[in-house]
Image (cartoon, rainbow, N blue to C red):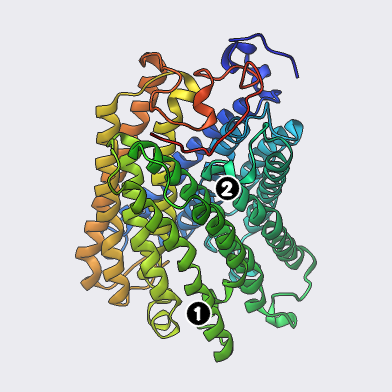
C-alpha cells in the first residue's frame, strides 16, 4: 500500500474506478460496501412494497400465489443476507474499526477486499436464481420445499454459502485487528463500545457461519446427488435441517443486532454529552449475548415434536438473553438521565431504536414461552416481532450511524431539517406497518400466505399504507444524503464534540487515518 502525505485524504489519494476496485484501504472498502448494501436495500424494499400491495385486499391484487411466494423469498433473502447481516459490520465496521482503535488499517487488507468480492459474487449467483425458475421456499430454504422446488434453489443456496464465506473473513479480520493493532494505551477496557459490539459479532460470524455453510452444501448435495440427509423418502429428516439452520440463524440474529446495539451506545453518550453509564456492563453484556446466542436455536422448534424437557430448557435460555439486553437499555436510559441531550437526527434514531427494540424484545420473551408460542407460531405475530427487532432495530441504528458518521466519512454536513423529517416518516410508517401485525397474529392470521380471511382486511390495509410512509421516509433520507454529498457544507473535524478517536482526525480522514500514531491515556467517553 502506498504511503500518504500529511493531510491527503483517502478520497483524493488515487482516482478512477480501477483504483477503487483494487483498493486495500479499509475506508474505501467500507464505502463500496455502503453502495452495495444501499443498492440491495432498494431491491429488497421494492419486493417488500410489492408484498404489502398484494396483501392490501382479499384475493389477488397484483400477482398470483406462486409469484407472491417468490417475491417473499427474494425479499427475505436480500434483506437478511445482503443488507442486515453485512450492513453495519461491513460498512461502518470496515470504515471505523481501525480508526477507533488508532490503527492504520485492518490486519489483513487483501482479505478485506476479497470479502467484498465474495459478497458481490454470492449476491450475483443468488439473484440469478430469478432466471432459473425462481425460488419459493422462503429465506429459510426449509425442507422439504427446497428439495422439491425449482433448480433456482441451488443458485440461491450457493449464493448464500459464498456470502457466508465473506462474513467469516470479515469476522476473522476484525478479531485479529482488535487484538493486534490497538494503538499505545488502548487496552480492551478502553476500546469504544461499538468496537466491543463488532468484536462480539465477529466471534459469532467465525463460529456459527460455517454451520450454515455446511447445511447449505448438504442441501445442494441432496438436490444434485440424491443423498438422504433431509428427504424422508430417502431416510432423511427434514427437522434436522431446521436444527442445523437455526443453530446458525439465531446467532445470526445477533450478528444483525449487536452492531446496532454498539451504534446506539455511541449515539446515546455523544448526544447526551455525558460519560456512558456502566461501560464494563455494556461491553461484557455484548460478549454474554454472543455466548448465549449459541444455545437458543430450539425455540424455533417448539411445535416440531421435540421433547418437553428440551422445550423448557430452550425457553429458559431464550429468556436469559433478555438479561444482558436489558442491561444495555437500562444503562442507556441512565446515561440520558440528567444529561445535556441534543436531539440531533442520530439521537432521534437512537431513541426510536430504543422504543421499537424494546417492543421487539418484550414480544420475544412472549414467544420464548412455550404455551404462547404454540398459539403465535407461524402467525403474523412472529412477523411483527421479527421486524421490530431486525428492521426497527438494525435499520434505525443504520440510519442513525449514517447521519452520525457522514461528516467524518465524506467531510460534508447534512441538512438537519430534512434528516429529521426522514426520521418522522420512518418512525411513524414503521409502527403503522408492523404494530397491526401483532393484532393480526393474535387473531390467528398465518404468515407466508398469499391470501387471508375477509375479517383481516382492515388491519392489512393499514399495514400496507404504513409501508408507503416508510418508503417515503427512506426516500427523504436518501435525498438528504445525496444533497449532503453534492452541496453539503464542509464538515469540521469534530462537529458533534465526541471524544472517541475517529473524531480526533481530519474529516474525511487522511489516507493512513492519522498523521502520527495516536496514544490513549483514558477511557473513550470522558465528557465534562
Percent position of residue 194, x then y: 53, 43
Please rate how many residues cluster around mark 2, counting C-alpha atoms within 10 Å: few if below 14, some from 14 to 19, many from 20: many
User: In the image shown, does 214 or 281 lie closer to the viewer?
Assistant: 281
Is 449 left or right of 308, judged from the image as shown?
Answer: left
Residue 267's place in the image compared with 482, above or below, is below
Please tell me which residue is depicted at 28% across the width and 27% down the height of the picture: 416
The part of the image, by quadrant, that contains residue 435 is bottom left
For the residues marked 2 and 1, what is the alpha-carbon distance in whole angstroms?
27 Å
Q: How many marks?
A: 2
Secondary structure, mark 1, is helix
Percent position of residue 303, x then y: 50, 83
Is 354 left or right of 164, judged from the image as shown?
Answer: left
User: In the image shown, does 500 or 50 lie closer to the viewer?
Assistant: 500
Percent position of residue 170, x then y: 67, 43
Is 399 left or right of 10, judged from the image as shown?
Answer: left
User: In the image shown, does 443 or 450 lie closer to the viewer?
Assistant: 443
Please rate how many residues cluster around mark 1, counting C-alpha atoms within 10 Å: few if below 14, some from 14 to 19, many from 20: many
Is 133 left or right of 387, judged from the image as shown?
Answer: right
Please tell me which residue is depicted at 69% across the width and 23% down the height of the picture: 23
Residue 307's place in the image compared with 391, above or below, is below
> What residue does disc 1 label?
315
> What residue does disc 2 label?
196
Residue 287 visible from this viewpoint: yes
Of labels 2 and 1, earlier in sequence is 2
Picture quarter with the N terminus: top right
Picture quarter with the C terminus: top left
Percent position of residue 431, x then y: 27, 55
Label ID, residue 386: none
Amino acid at each position: 500500500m502506498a504511503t500518504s502525505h500529511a493531510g491527503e485524504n483517502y478520497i483524493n489519494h488515487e482516482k478512477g474506478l480501477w483504483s477503487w476496485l483494487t483498493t486495500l484501504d479499509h475506508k474505501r472498502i467500507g464505502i463500496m460496501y455502503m453502495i452495495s448494501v444501499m443498492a440491495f436495500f432498494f431491491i429488497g424494499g421494492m419486493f417488500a412494497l410489492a408484498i404489502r400491495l398484494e396483501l392490501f385486499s382479499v384475493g389477488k391484487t397484483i400477482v398470483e400465489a406462486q409469484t407472491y411466494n417468490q417475491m417473499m423469498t427474494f425479499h427475505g433473502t436480500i434483506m437478511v443476507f445482503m443488507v442486515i447481516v453485512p450492513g453495519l459490520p461491513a460498512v461502518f465496521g470496515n470504515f471505523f474499526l481501525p480508526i477507533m482503535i488508532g490503527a492504520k488499517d485492518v490486519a489483513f487488507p487483501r482479505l478485506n477486499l476479497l470479502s467484498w468480492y465474495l459478497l458481490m459474487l454470492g449476491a450475483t449467483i443468488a439473484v440469478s436464481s430469478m432466471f432459473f425458475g425462481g425460488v419459493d421456499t422462503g429465506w429459510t430454504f426449509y425442507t422439504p420445499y427446497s428439495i422439491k422446488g425449482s433448480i433456482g434453489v441451488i443458485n440461491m443456496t450457493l449464493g448464500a454459502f459464498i456470502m457466508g464465506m465473506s462474513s467469516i473473513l470479515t469476522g476473522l479480520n476484525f478479531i485479529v485487528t482488535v487484538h493486534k493493532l490497538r494503538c499505545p494505551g488502548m487496552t480492551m477496557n478502553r476500546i469504544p463500545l461499538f468496537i466491543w459490539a463488532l468484536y462480539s459479532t465477529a466471534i459469532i460470524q467465525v463460529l456459527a457461519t460455517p454451520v450454515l455453510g455446511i447445511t447449505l452444501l448438504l442441501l445442494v448435495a441432496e438436490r444434485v446427488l440424491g443423498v438422504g440427509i433431509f428427504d424422508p423418502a430417502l431416510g432423511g429428516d427434514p427437522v434436522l435441517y431446521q436444527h442445523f439452520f437455526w443453530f446458525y440463524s439465531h446467532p445470526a440474529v445477533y450478528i444483525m443486532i449487536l452492531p446496532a446495539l454498539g451504534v446506539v451506545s455511541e449515539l446515546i453518550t455523544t448526544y447526551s454529552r455525558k460519560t456512558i453509564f456502566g461501560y464494563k456492563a455494556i461491553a461484557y453484556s455484548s460478549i454474554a449475548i454472543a455466548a448465549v446466542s449459541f444455545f437458543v436455536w430450539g425455540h424455533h422448534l417448539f411445535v416440531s415434536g421435540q421433547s418437553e424437557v428440551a422445550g423448557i430448557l430452550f425457553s429458559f435460555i431464550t429468556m436469559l438473553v433478555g438479561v444482558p439486553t436489558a442491561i444495555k437499555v437500562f444503562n442507556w436510559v441512565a446515561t440520558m438521565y440528567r444529561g445535556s441531550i441534543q436531539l440531533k437526527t442520530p439521537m432521534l434514531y437512537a431513541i426510536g431504536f430504543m422504543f421499537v427494540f424494546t417492543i421487539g424484545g418484550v414480544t420475544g420473551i412472549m414467544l420464548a414461552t412455550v404455551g404462547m408460542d404454540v398459539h403465535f407460531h407461524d402467525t403474523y405475530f412472529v412477523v411483527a416481532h421479527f421486524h421490530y427487532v431486525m428492521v426497527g432495530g438494525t435499520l434505525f441504528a443504520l440510519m442513525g450511524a449514517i447521519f452520525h458518521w457522514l461528516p467524518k466519512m465524506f467531510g460534508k454536513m447534512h441538512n438537519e431539517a430534512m434528516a429529521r423529517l426522514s426520521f418522522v416518516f420512518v418512525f411513524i410508517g414503521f409502527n403503522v406497518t408492523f404494530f397491526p401485525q401483532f393484532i393480526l397474529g393474535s387473531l390467528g392470521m398465518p404468515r407466508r400466505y398469499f391470501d387471508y380471511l375477509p375479517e383481516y382486511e382492515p388491519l392489512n390495509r393499514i399495514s400496507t399504507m404504513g409501508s408507503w410512509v416508510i418508503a417515503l421516509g427512506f426516500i427523504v433520507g436518501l435525498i438528504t444524503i445525496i444533497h449532503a454529498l453534492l452541496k453539503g457544507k464542509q464538515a469540521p473535524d469534530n462537529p458533534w464534540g465526541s471524544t472517541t478517536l475517529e473524531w480526533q482526525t481530519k474529516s474525511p480522514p487522511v489516507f493512513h487515518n492519522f498523521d502520527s500514531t495516536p496514544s490513549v491515556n483514558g477511557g473513550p467517553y470522558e465528557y465534562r
